[in-house]
Image (cartoon, rainbow, N blue to C red):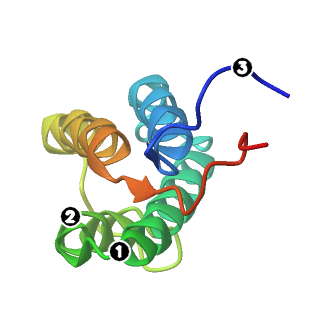
Amino acid sequence: MSSYPTPAFSRPALAPGILATIVLVAGVVLIGGGGFIFILYGISILALIICVFAGQAGLWWWLAAFAPIAVLWNPVVAFPFSGLIWQLAQFAAAFVFIAGGLLIKVPNPEDRNRR
């Protein structure tokens, strides 16, 4: 048992948001290469995971940010972006992932540490 009280809310999208940001920033060097397909898969899946967390939190407006990311980074139907546009999109998406990870909050239903 912990002596600390349970926080009033949790941030379920924080870990996927940080992971996606790391993948996006590291993936900038792979743009145009064969390994970039793995970046596309990872970002698309993480964007969909955060869409689920935003829906569970009732914050539907975040879908307007993460659904386009899931579509644009979709490796099955790839968009022909390259160069500076794609690099700027990578950093813009990283900002969206960090913002979503910090701002998507779900209230904790009960105090798990209550005796």
Specify the amino acid type for callout 3: Ser
Q: Residue at x 25, y 47 (%)?
A: 82
Real-space Cα separation, disc 3 to disc 1, in angstroms:
44 Å
* 37 relative to 61, above or below: above
Which residue is nearer to you in this view: 31 or 20?
20
Q: Residue at x 31, y 76 (%)?
A: 58
Real-space Cα separation, disc 2 to disc 3, in angstroms:
38 Å
The residue wearing badge 2 is: 65
Q: Residues within 10 Å of mark 2 (few under 14, many from 20)?
A: some
* Sequence-earlier tag: 3 or 1: 3
**Which SS class for mark 1?**
helix
Which residue is nearer to you in this view: 83 or 24?
24
The residue wearing badge 3 is: 3
Q: Are marks 2 and 3 in contact (CB under 8 Å)?
A: no
Which residue is nearer to you in this view: 98 or 39?
98
Residue 114 placement (x, y as % from top left): 71, 44
Q: Is residue 115 left or right of residue 44?
A: right
Q: Residue at x 54, y 45 (%)?
A: 16
Farthest-out residue, front: 115
Q: Write down the quadrant of residue 85 in the picture.
A: top left
**Which SS class for mark 2?**
helix
**Which SS class for mark 3?**
loop
The residue wearing badge 1 is: 71
Q: Is residue 85 left or right of residue 16?
A: left
* Sequence-earlier tag: 2 or 3: 3
Residue 102 placement (x, y as % from top left): 32, 38
